[in-house]
Image (cartoon, helix red, strand yellow):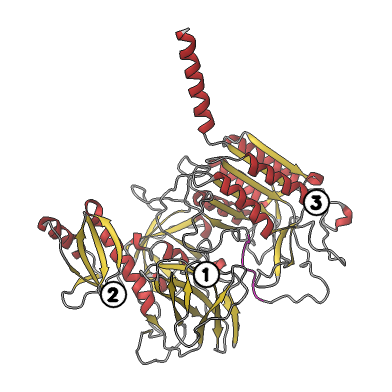
């Protein structure tokens, strides 16, 4: 009897453990045989299934549902995703794959800046508008995004999700020898007005309200798209010469060779390299939580890097210039794309920045080597050339004199940190076994670090604060050519009247606002908007936190003598006090978002995020007299509002 009870307990323990193990669940949607009446050409998506399904099984996915052709109507897809929501549980790992046509379709809720939703073409959806059609047979990005978000809420923060969209969302023409997954003009009713502005990327992230601290914990999610928002997606050929989706082929091949420590970013680097070889006219895109382990839930620390813009003969140009601290004489090393960390790995090549512009820089290699495609390599900074950013500090009360001396020694190694007893920016003091960093002008504590861990972390925090301070103080010599306005609105984005227009606008915790940008110059300008919190921390507004590439940055432009409203509403939340929205604009696309998210590339040791960005422009600090700007331009403007309880 005792033996029986013991075995029963062991069995129950095994069952409990199995129930707690994350499951790997997949949904593959593939539409090849579109009905003739729909107007859509037939595709080779059945081949995508033949490749993707065994690749997923090899990765441990044993619950795979497949929807094809007539089963993949709008209703069929929605029901399958709702079923997945019901079936999913916290910690599960989910993969969702769509292969089929994509199309832009008239917006039905006013959330798209160009008046067009992106949509998957479900089985039976028409290619052309007919009177009375409301888009009910298409699967709009808004609806798909909400279905995705519902699943993520079930998975929770311990689960993860990868969505692969092997379709195009554009009506533009493309090059390529394969079948086109899309290619139809946008579906719009007669007389429907389409804005000429560029599409605002994928709507799959739209279900996540852009806010600080809304208190929900959906799972991390990553989205791979076959092409950017202004491109079409072409099929390619497999090894046997059969047609297959270009992204499906690349994902399958990348999964077959991925290592044990791969992140979604690492996998995408391989996908990008394969697609660059197969369909070089396309720019596959990645969004979301890229630095978590592949089909896992743990975050993997990705060492910051830069991508190559082009390799032309012996000239290597990188996507990054003085605007992000890539000053001349900065030493760099080149590694294969997908490298997580360069420690103990020999680089393919070493060099230094020989010619640095605001947006792009040129590398001079120590030894010439043959490099192939730009997509195959990443650039890592090994020794920064310090810019002009600096921060003044002094010590307050530190109980242990030996600890104080240790702090002084380590902070003294930080070239941008200067001791100043009379007029410091920051006061460092110890309280309750924490080293606190306090702003001297208003007494706000901006960081609090355990004393036992503080030596290295304080330098990191000082560097990040200095870079943020530089962004706050940076101003251009252009007077009022770019302006910013914060407009009170409801949660749906409908404008509300501000109660105190004659003074600083106040927003209560939980209220909403939209941002308008005005271009009074005579040229098209590209812009970034950042949010500077009362405690000095900086958040990107546009490009958004998941929009990390130059391709994303290209969509944020404003024509001469015009205005543009950012289409989403921002939820206002603590900390309380004076908040600043600031716009940076230039005549070339640029993207501050990845560097803001990495504390201004602080892990590279670079302190000159934008310090020497416009040497030719002679950028002015706040309050200085405007000087003439010769060629490359920087415009800035800001607006202050107050967050109250």
- Circle 3 crowding by C-alpha within 10 Å: few under 14, some 14–19, many from 20: many
Which residue lies under the disc numbered 2?
A: 442
At a point 71% along the width and 46% down the height, the residue shown is: 29
At a point 50% along the width and 74% down the height, the residue shown is: 528
Query: Which SS class for mark 1?
Result: loop
Disc ID at residue 511: 1
> Is 127 one of the magenta-colored residues?
no
Q: Quadrant of the C terminus?
A: bottom left
**In the image shown, does 305 or 594 lie closer to the viewer?**
594
Residue 242 appears in the rendering: no
Q: Residue 423, percent across and down?
A: 20, 78
> Which comes before the other along the chain, label 1 or label 2?
2
Q: Residue 344, percent across and down?
A: 33, 47
- Circle 1 crowding by C-alpha within 10 Å: few under 14, some 14–19, many from 20: some
Which residue lies under the disc numbered 3?
A: 123
Query: Which SS class for mark 3?
Result: loop
Q: Which residues are magenta?
A: 197-203
Magenta stretch, overall SS: loop
Q: Is residue 182 left or right of residue 3?
A: right
Q: Is residue 111 left or right of residue 15?
A: right
Q: Is 331 situated above or below 151?
A: below
At a point 69% along the width and 39% down the height, the residue shown is: 65
**In the image shown, does 611 or 158 lie closer to the viewer?**
158
**In the image shown, does 156 or 94 lie closer to the viewer?**
156
């Amino acid at each position: 009897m005792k033996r029986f009870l013991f075995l029963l307990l062991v069995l129950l323990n095994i069952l409990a453990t199995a129930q707690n193990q994350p499951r790997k669940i997949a949904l593959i949607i593939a539409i090849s045989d579109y009905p003739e009446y729909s107007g859509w050409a037939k595709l080779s998506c059945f081949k995508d299934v033949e490749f993707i399904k065994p690749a997923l099984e090899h990765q441990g996915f044993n619950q795979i549902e497949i929807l094809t052709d007539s089963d993949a109507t709008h209703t069929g897809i929605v029901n399958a995703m709702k079923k997945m929501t019901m079936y999913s549980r916290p910690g599960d790992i989910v993969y969702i794959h769509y292969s089929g046509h994509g199309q832009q379709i008239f917006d039905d809720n006013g959330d798209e800046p160009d008046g067009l939703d992106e949509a998957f073409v479900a089985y039976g959806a028409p290619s052309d508008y007919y009177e009375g059609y409301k888009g009910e047979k298409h699967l709009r990005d808004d609806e798909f995004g909400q279905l995705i978000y519902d699943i993520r809420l079930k998975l929770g923060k311990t689960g993860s999700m990868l969505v692969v969209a092997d379709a195009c969302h554009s009506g533009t023409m493309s090059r390529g020898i394969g079948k086109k997954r899309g290619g139809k003009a946008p579906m719009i009713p007669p007389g429907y007005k389409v804005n000429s502005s560029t599409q605002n990327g994928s709507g799959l992230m739209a279900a996540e309200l852009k806010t600080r601290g809304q208190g929900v914990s959906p799972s991390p999610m990553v989205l791979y798209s076959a092409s950017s928002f202004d491109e079409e997606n072409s099929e390619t050929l497999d090894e046997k010469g059969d047609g297959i989706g270009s992204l499906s082929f690349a994902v399958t091949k990348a999964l077959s060779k991925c290592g044990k420590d791969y992140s979604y970013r690492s996998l995408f680097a391989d996908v990008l390299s394969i697609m660059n070889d197969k369909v070089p006219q396309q720019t596959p895109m990645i969004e979301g939580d890229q630095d978590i382990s592949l089909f896992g839930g743990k975050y993997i620390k990705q060492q910051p890097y830069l991508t190559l813009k082009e390799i032309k003969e012996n000239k290597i140009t990188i996507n990054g210039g003085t605007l992000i601290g890539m000053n001349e004489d900065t030493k760099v090393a080149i590694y294969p794309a997908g490298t997580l960390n360069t420690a103990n790995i020999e680089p393919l090549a070493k060099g230094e920045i020989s010619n640095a512009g605001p947006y792009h820089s040129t590398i001079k290699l120590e030894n010439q080597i043959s490099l192939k495609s730009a997509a195959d390599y990443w650039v890592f900074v090994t020794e920064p050339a310090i810019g002009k950013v600096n921060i003044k500090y002094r010590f307050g009360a530190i109980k242990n004199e030996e600890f104080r001396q240790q702090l002084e020694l380590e902070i003294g190694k930080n070239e941008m940190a200067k001791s100043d007893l009379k007029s410091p920016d920051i006061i460092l003091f110890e309280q309750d076994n924490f080293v606190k960093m306090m702003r001297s002008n208003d007494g706000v504590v901006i960081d609090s670090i355990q004393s036992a861990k503080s030596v290295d972390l304080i330098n990191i925090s000082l560097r990040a604060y200095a870079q943020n301070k530089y962004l706050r103080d940076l101003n251009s010599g252009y007077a009022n050519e770019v302006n910013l306005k914060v407009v009170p609105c409801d949660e749906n984005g409908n404008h509300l009247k501000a109660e105190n227009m004659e003074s600083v606008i106040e927003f209560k915790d939980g209220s909403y606002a939209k941002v308008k940008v005005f271009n009074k110059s005579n040229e098209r300008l590209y812009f970034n908007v950042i949010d500077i919190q009362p405690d000095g921390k900086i958040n990107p507004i546009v490009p958004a936190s998941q929009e990390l590439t130059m391709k994303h940055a290209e969509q944020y432009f404003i024509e001469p003598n015009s205005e543009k409203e950012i289409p989403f509403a921002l939820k206002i939340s603590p900390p309380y006090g004076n908040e600043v929205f600031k716009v940076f604009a230039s005549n070339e696309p640029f993207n501050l978002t990845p560097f803001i998210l990495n504390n201004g590339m602080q892990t590279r040791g670079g302190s000159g995020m934008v310090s020497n960005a416009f040497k030719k422009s002679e950028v002015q600090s706040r309050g200085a007299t405007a000087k003439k700007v010769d060629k490359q331009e920087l415009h800035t403007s800001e607006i202050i509002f107050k967050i109250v309880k």
